[in-house]
Amino acid sequence: MSLVAVLLATISFAAAFTLPGGYNNDDPNKGHATLIKRLALKAFLLSDTITFCSMVFERSITKNLSKLA
């Protein structure tokens, strides 16, 4: 379970830096995500954040439980 948590945390961390749709190169919106106003991107970012936080939380619980055993 711990290995799965670490792998999912790694994948979700990497996904945060490779946003779908890429980035704008135009001057007024330079560096902003192309799909920033789309609901799908907001859902992606929310699910990515929840996945990362839950995997880090699960890993810390597993680590603390192993100390008690």
Image (spheres, grey):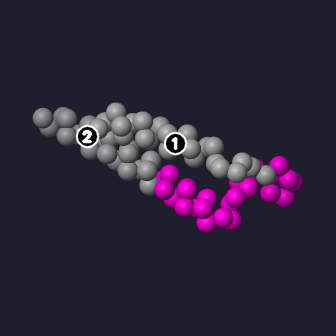
Category of crowding for the residue at label 1, using alpha-carbon neighbours closer than 10 angstroms: few (below 14), some (14–19), many (at least 20): some
Q: In the rendered view, does 27 fall on the left or right side of 67?
A: right
* Discs 1, 2 touching: Cβ within 8 Å: no
Residue 64, x across and y down, in percent: 23, 40
Residue 40, x across and y down, in percent: 60, 62
State the count of labels. Answer: 2
Residue 36, x across and y down, in percent: 68, 60
Q: In the rendered view, does 50 fall on the left or right side of 17?
A: left
Task: Name the residue: 74% across, 49% down.
Answer: 23
The quadrant of the rendering that contains the N terminus is top left
Determine which of the numbered discs, if any, sits on residue 38 in the image.
none
**Callout 2: SS:** helix
Which range of residues does the magenta coloring cover? 25-49
Residue 24 forms part of the magenta stretch: no
Q: In the rendered view, does 11 fall on the left or right side of 2?
A: right
Task: Determine which quarter of the picture holds residue 56.
Answer: top left
Relative depth, front residue between 12 and 56: 12
Task: Determine which quarter of the picture holds residue 33.
Answer: bottom right
Task: Name the residue: 73% across, 55% down.
Answer: 34
Residue 11 position (above or below residue 33): above
Residue flagged by tag 1: what amino acid is it? Phe
The quadrant of the rendering that contains the C terminus is top left
Task: Name the residue: 43% across, 50% down.
Answer: 51
Residue 12, x across and y down, in percent: 50, 44
Residue flagged by tag 2: what amino acid is it? Thr
Determine which of the numbered discs, if any, sits on residue 13 in the image.
1
Q: Residue furthest right?
A: 27
Name the residue tied to disc 2.
62
Residue 46 position (above or below residue 56): below
Q: In the rendered view, does 5 fall on the left or right side of 12?
A: left
